[in-house]
Amino acid sequence: LGLALYASSLCAVSGAAFLYHDYCVIGAGPSGLQAAYFLQQAGRDYVVFERSHAPGSFFALYPRHRKLISINKRYTGKSNSEFNLRHDWNSLLSHDRRLLFRRYSRDFFPDADAMVRYLEDFASLLKLQVQYNTAIIHVTLERDRQAWNGHYFLLTDQDRQNYKCSSLLVATGTWVPNVVNFPGSEYVEGYETVSINPEDFAGQTVLILGRGNSAFETAENILGVTNFIHMVSRSRVRLSWATHYVGDLRAINNGLLDTYQLKSLDGLLEGDLEDLAIIKDKKGKLHITLRFYLENRNTSAGIDSVTLPQDELDNFATRAPYDRVIRCLGWKFDFSIYNRSLRMMPGKGNKKKYPQIKPSYESRSTRGLFVLGTASHSVDFRKSAGGFIHGFRYTTRAVHRLLENRHHGVPWPSTVYPITQLTNSIIKRVNEASGLYQMFSILADIILLRENATAFEYLEEYPVGVLAELETQTGRKAPNGLFVVIMEYGRNFSGADKDVFYYNRAVGEAQHAWQSNFLHPIIYYYKRLPTEREMRLRPPDWPLPRPDAIHHIVEDFLTDWTAPNAHILPLRRFLENCLSTDLRNFFAESCFLFAFTRQKLPPFCRQGYVRMQGLVGSEGLRRHAVEAGLLEDYAPTDFSGDRPPDSREGSQDQLLRDHAIPVRPLQHLVNAKDE
Amino acid sequence: MSAQKDRWVFSFSFLLFCASSIPTRGSMRLLQELSPQEYFSSLQAGRASLAYFSHNVSPGAQPFLEQIEDSAEALQDYGVSVVKVNCPKEDVSRYCGKENAVRKAYLFRGNMLIREFPTDALFDVNSIVANVLFALLFNEVKYVETLADLQNIENALKGRSNMVFAYVPATGTAEHRAVMEAAFAYGTVHQFVLTTEATLLKDTGNDESDVSSARLLFCHCQQATDLAEPCRRTAMGQTLTMLNIHKHLKLMGAPLVTEVAEDPEKVSTVHLQLGLPLVFILSQKETYEADRRTAEFVAWQLLGKAGVALLSRDLVDLNILLRSNVALKTPDEGVPIKYLVLEDTDEVITLVENKNKIEQIQEDEEEDEEDEDEKENNNQDIQDDQVVEAVSRDKKRELPVEQILVLTEETFHSALLETARTVVLFYASWEAVSLAVLRSYTEVADHLKGTRGVLLSRVNCWDWPGVCTKENVTQLPTIKIYEKGERSVMYNGMWGTEELTSFIMLSRVSCPLKLATIDEAEGYLRGEFPSELSSHHHTSLLGVFSTATSEAREAFEEAGNILSGHVTMGMYFEDDALALSRKYAVSPPALLLARSGGRSVEGIALSKQSAQDMVRMIRYESLDIFPEITVQNLPRYLQFRKPFLILFSDGDISQMESKEMLKLAKGRPQQAFVACWLNLKKTPVGRGVLKAYFATMPSLPVLVWVNLHAGGQVFKFPSEQSITEMNILSWLEKLKAGLEIPSSTLSEEDWKPPLPAYDFLQMMETAVPELPLHTSHRRGDTPERHPPESPGGDTAVREEPAQETKAEKVGSPGRDLRGTAPRLAAREKQGKRHSKL
């Protein structure tokens, strides 16, 4: 830090007018503000650049029809604030209880204006350092061996003001509209500018390009007034309730599916937009044809010379002409501001709208550059919630924790517990943790075992993709094995075109828990930290390599995993067998007996009773335990039969003296036979 | 292994016991010795006697004579007297005269000879009893050789009486004797039929049994109506002993189905008395007829293995699931009745038979691996955590929690400001240990009802995790006492009602308490001041400081903070402190220790000790020298990691013992062991300790030396010596010298998982073998499907074969419905491609 300060003052002196900060955040949207919050809480030197005059400028414009599809569940029947975040998709993380989204809107699907207001309040109430009206137009590197990452980031804004940062957090989202170029694409209106007044579409025939939520949202808006709407895209419609991915088509927007399947003139079609061509006729109607036909022709010749598909195939689906064609193809990341030295590369395949990053959210080619928020969704695209507020608020926190460890020597926060709390710690987290729940398959709790399994260290919400680097990324040591607590859907359950409502879809019995389909907790056990190679070669669809043992907690209709026999008992058995110990609880009386009859004590007695914190228990509980056959009642009435007649005592003693009898273990407790 | 050895020792001692008692029994001399005249004149009509005629003692007859002597007692039970007739030398009468007559024994009824037995047919007690009874019960026990004979008898009995058919490989055996003895008792009730022909056994449909072992079948001919059909038979599963046959016949005589209209816990039938389980078929008025038929069907299947009762739910108010249709009551005391939901009668039968099998295995101590596994798998889902189970059994009971204020995130801080002291229990409503503590906490609330200045409250961390995190509650349960606007103390004592109550009471007084006058200080030592604690029995500690010793005083105050709630500490540092210290012959800084109401005050000099040292010293000094050990206070003594010398006593120990032990304990100031006593009346679990040490209860009181932390040997002070300091010391010397042999050694076994877990990894691999779980597999094994290129103008609807994603899930169908729906079965998927542009 001293060096950095020195460097910054140097810059100022040299007159180049670099303003220095340890951390620069580009974009004051949800993820930028979320990152700012954590940096501020940690007392770091940071600044957020926002090109607009207020935070969340994307939400000021989008969605065009103003209805957010992130749910605002105001009631859950529970007061647990952490649990409630599982069903709050709009709030950012903070300590301030005023900054819960349910205070900003009463709607289940809130208006986007509420989000804008929320983000404004978030920035101002928490006094975050946001520099508005600053559009970063260029980012480049300055090599410096003394910098944190071997280079500084040099940022330039629209006024040619330069900024210098040690670490760059890119939270710009994806805001550049996706555009397809084909002959006639100039006739196409964009989602960004198309009218949102349904009256403008009255009696018109509309073709919509795209099949995401923006396309359906647009269709939904004009469904009632158009002649008919057709939708074209390359892929089949993916319904979020079938894929368990919130970015796919949500039920709230899918009114058109109804009218299509009920033959009410609307329709869906599949085809590659790159093959498309649009031709405008003299009446201004738009005809669909294929690029293939145009290539053989002189395009200037006008509509009459162009072959239309229906000329050859008279029942061609889109043979009717359209009044309007609207493009709703989503957005992509703005790659344009980065100097080539940063090598910000687009992802491959369907991830090309996102920059390439590692599972730690750091750029693949530039150390010290982290991508946050929607732009970081390549890590879990079409899998988890990392592209959405309710997901990236947690991944942003994870990135902040990685940075705290890397640059400030603050290891990943953790709590050390005695081993007797192991089952409880897991049960507590899987029942209330929101980060595990929202960022399923991506963020996981890590339990690092201490020597001899007498204690453990609990780390929350670590990005599981960089499990192999755990020790360097967190500053915690894992020499004695670890558990990874994660939540997952059943492997073959969800996906486009899968029937997720089939009969017998839910598993009810703990012994079949591994076949659970709905989101449920899974615990992986590794005797040692997996290596990077093992991570790379892990089975497809697995977030982690093959563990030494695995446990599924059976899916639950209420997502309440606190049932003593169905949830907690099998988990305890799993943990016991991994650690090769006995994790049962015992009343003080049992510990007393063990203390006098065994040389070793079970962990519960060792860590409780022996330290004068034995569980005495009430008389009623003692009686229940006796009735269950799990506690022996030594009250004298039971005992008369065992007293030997006096005449035999002498010989009995003699015998016992000659044969040292090993003490019989307390069979009923050790083996726990219920008989 | 240890158990087996144990058992071996047991049976060995039993043998010894028998052996020692046999001569006494033998001396009763049941065998009469009479002359021929005496014998024949003593014969009474109807009374049977077995006579053996002898000239002096011929050497060859000696072993036979011994056997016949031994059988005298057994035969006496059946009214047969055994007589040795001593023939005079000159006697040549019928029995004495002939040379070979002395090789025989004669059975008379009255003076009529019934049978002569060659002595070689009477080789032992069994054969003598069997043959004699066989001869006497000639009419009651029919001997058959052919199947036709058997069928004739059977047919004749139909509708009239039942038949007991026994097969023995040879007469004169123990089994034969058992059958005969049973026939003697039951011969008038049932018709007994005996055979030695193995073919008959096979013909009666018992082909699975091997002919070398005896068999007994009970034939239910009384109820048989169809003459063409053989009577229904129930084979006896156990070996043929008198006891087993008796049990079997008792069971056959019991009603097939017992109708019950009372609490099943109170029901007792012959089955339970004989150690067999009783199955209840739960019936309702509406289904009575069908249930009755079911019960009868099951009863026939289980005949001889378990009893069946028909319980009508309409008549008994049962607090059980409506779905339950079967209940199982085991003969074991204290095992509650299990209520089950079963789907067919086979399940009932398997239930009983498996249970019997398991018991058999346990009895025989045979470790059959497979059965063991099976058994374990069955038990994996049975709760074996005593705390969790006790709490879940108690969950329906409503707790009396009105006294305890429920705090929330909103009310937490304001509540703390309202009362001088707020006790807060942090717990989770799903966590068993904290629920167990909550139960004790309600009792504390009851004790403290009306105590001013103390508010009992609770926070459910499952509802309000924020409060718990902020209050630094990492473990559940946690109890903290908050002083108004000031510090908080975390409770770190036993989770018991008494301990917690006492802690809260003691916490009300500041620790250490500054005493202002010498009168207060004296009152404090007597336990009369402060008044809040006068009712509380405790040891009082008073630090006396001169004004110069501020360093020691600070350490003392710090120690007081740490020990707050556990001990009562006062301090006096007024100008006249010297007067006080002089009275107790100490010089300040010093600690005065008043045990039990100030009857004795000890003085201890405080040197330059740190607060931690002082804490340790105070803890040590407030322990008793010869304590009564209890469940609650044992840990305080365990921490010294020294051997224990324990006097186990049933009730209070005598003054003499107490005096001697105290002498012993006091005699060694830095003693190498903990001397204590245990009152079995107050701490019954001590019996469990003794049971583990000695297998059987020794006579009390008993003095035991246990090396708890080194080797685990247990030594018993010789019971013939009296418990005096001298005797104990010399015994301890012998122990130290290794001259004593330990009674037992404590197990060194580690605490392993009680049962295995579900091996999901293995299940996944066996059920879905194509799952590339092994790291050796590379990803991308399946070739990527290229999307078909868009063909120009092709609008035909295309159908493609189903994709290769038909991952069928295999699994055994489960029967119960615990989740939303039962498990998934195999499913099929038809993938169809959509119409194309």
Image (cartoon, coloured by chain):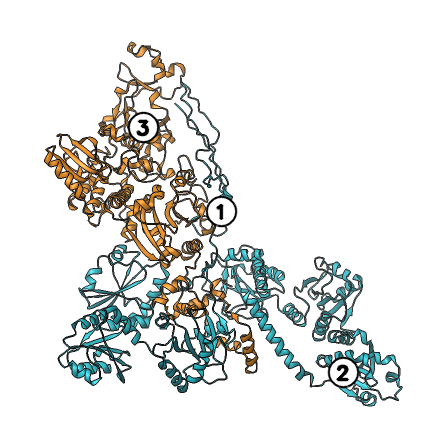
Chain colours: A orange, B cyan
Look at the picture and state if A570 lies above or below B713: above
What secondary structure is marked by label 3? Answer: loop
Look at the picture and state if A165 lies above or below B608: above
What secondary structure is marked by label 1? Answer: helix
Q: Is residue B58 left or right of residue A138?
A: right
Which circle, 2 or 3, is nearer the viewer?
2
The chain letter for the residue carrying disc 1 is B
- Whether the residues at callouts 2 and 3 have beta carbons within 8 Å, the answer is no
Amino acid type indicated by mark 3: Gly
The residue singled out by tag 1 in the image is: B762
Image coords of residue A242 (percent x, y): 38, 38
What secondary structure is marked by label 2? Answer: strand
The residue lying toward the viewer, choosing from A409 and B686, is A409
The chain letter for the residue carrying disc 2 is B
Name the quadrant containing residue A382.
top left
The N terminus of chain B sits in image quarter: bottom right
Image coords of residue B224 (percent x, y): 70, 63
Amino acid type indicated by mark 1: Gln
Q: How far apart are marks 2 and 3 (CA)?
A: 112 Å
Q: Distance between the residues labelled 2 and 1?
A: 72 Å
Residue occupying the point 34% across, 13% down: A295
Within 10 Å of the Cα at label 2, are there few (<14), some (14-19), or many (20+) other Cα atoms?
many
The residue lying toward the viewer, choosing from A182 and B373, is B373
Q: Is residue A158 left or right of residue A260?
A: left
Amino acid type indicated by mark 2: Val
Image coords of residue B711 (percent x, y): 45, 68
The residue singled out by tag 2 in the image is: B82
Res A210 label: 3
- Whether the residues at callouts 1 and 3 have beta carbons within 8 Å, the answer is no
Image coords of residue B555 (percent x, y): 21, 70
